[in-house]
Image (cartoon, rainbow, N blue to C red):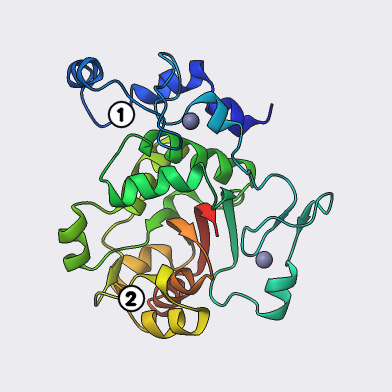
Amino acid sequence: MNVYAAILEPALAQRSRTRALTSGVFESAAGLLYPPHCMACGLPLEVHGNGAICGACAGKVLWVGADRCRRCGERAGAGRGSVEACPACERRPPVFVAQSCAVAQYDDPLRALILGLKFSGSLQALPLLARLLAQRVHDTQMLEGLDAKQTALVPVPMHRREFAARGFNQAEEVARLAAKHLGIRVETGLLRKLRPTRPQATLGADARRENLRDAFAADAKKAARYAQGCAILVDDVMTTGSTAGECAKALRAAGVQEVRGAFVARG
Ligand SMILES: [Zn+2]
Ligand SMILES: [Zn+2]
C-alpha cells in the first residue's frame, strides 16, 4: 500500500479527524443525527474510516505517484520516474511556475470530494485533502533547500463577490491545514483577485487564458518577504495551468523570487 492510500486508512484518519473544524461535541451529536456517508458513492461510512470516502472508493483514487512531470505535476508514463517536462510541457512550457506537484488525477472519487467541498459547502473532506496535499509536498521534496522563513503556501484567491457567494475559499482552507502539517506559513493577503471571472471549467484553453488575463495582483510590500524565497501556490484543481500561471505572474511581478504549485488534483 502506498503512503497516500495509508492516509485513507482508519488509524491515521482518526488523527486528522481530531483537527476537523467542528468541535468534538458537535461532531458526535451531528454524527448521531446524520450518520456520515461516503461522498463518492453515498453508502454509509465505516465507523473508524477516514470520514469522507469508504474503503471501496478509496481504492479507486488514481494517485500521481513516482512517475510524474516536475514542471506541471501531471502523471508521466509508467516507469519513466520523475521527468523535467512531460510532452505537454515540452510543447508549451508553463510560464512563471517553476515546478508543481499534484496528489492524484482529477477523477472520481477524488473529484467527488472536491466538488462536495466546493459546491455543497461540505467541509467533510477538508482534513483528508489537506493531509494528502501536505504529504505530496513532502514526498516530492518541494520544500528542500528552501528557507522556511521565506517560504509560504499561497492559496489561489477568490474575488470578494465570489467569496461572498460561496462563504469560504476551498483553496485557502486546504492551504491552512496543509501549512500546519508542513510547519510553514500560509499567506492570504499577498495575492488578490481583482475581478470576478467565469468558471474555468466551462471554457476551452484559449478562453481560459483570456478569462483570467491580469485578474490577479500581489502586494509588493508583502512580496518583499519572499524576494529571496518561494511562494507555493495552492489550489484544489490544476487543469490547463492558466490560473496558476496568472497568479504566478502577479507574484513574480511583485518581487517574489520563485513560484511553485501544489495541487490536490491534476485535471
Ligand atoms: Zn464509497
Ligand atoms: Zn508537464
Element type where label 1 sits in the image: loop
Q: Quadrant of the N terminus?
A: top right
Instruction: Name the one closer to the observer, 195 or 121.
Output: 121
Query: Could you tell me if residue 31 is visible in this image?
Result: yes
219 up-or-down from 62: above or below? below
Q: To which quarter of the image does residue 45 belong? A: top left
Between tags 2 and 1, which lies in front?
A: 1
Q: Residue at x 52, y 45 (%)?
A: 108
Answer with mark 2 or mark 1, whichever residue precedes in sequence.
Answer: 1
Q: Dividing the image into four equal quarters, which quarter contains ligand 2?
A: bottom right
Q: Which residue is drawn at 18% across and 16% down?
A: 29
97 up-or-down from 187: above or below? below
Q: To which quarter of the image does residue 39 belong? A: top left
- Measured as percent of width and height from the top left, residue 216 is found at 33, 75
- Measured as percent of width and height from the top left, residue 220 is found at 31, 74
The residue that disc 2 covers is: 216
Cα gap from disc 2 to disc 1, whole angstroms: 31 Å
Instruction: Name the one closer to the observer, 121 or 215.
Output: 121
- The three-letter code of the residue at mark 2 reads Phe
150 up-or-down from 44: above or below? below
- Label tally: 2
Q: Which residue is drawn at 42% across and 26% down?
A: 43
- The three-letter code of the residue at mark 1 reads Ala
Residue 20 numbered mark, or none:
1
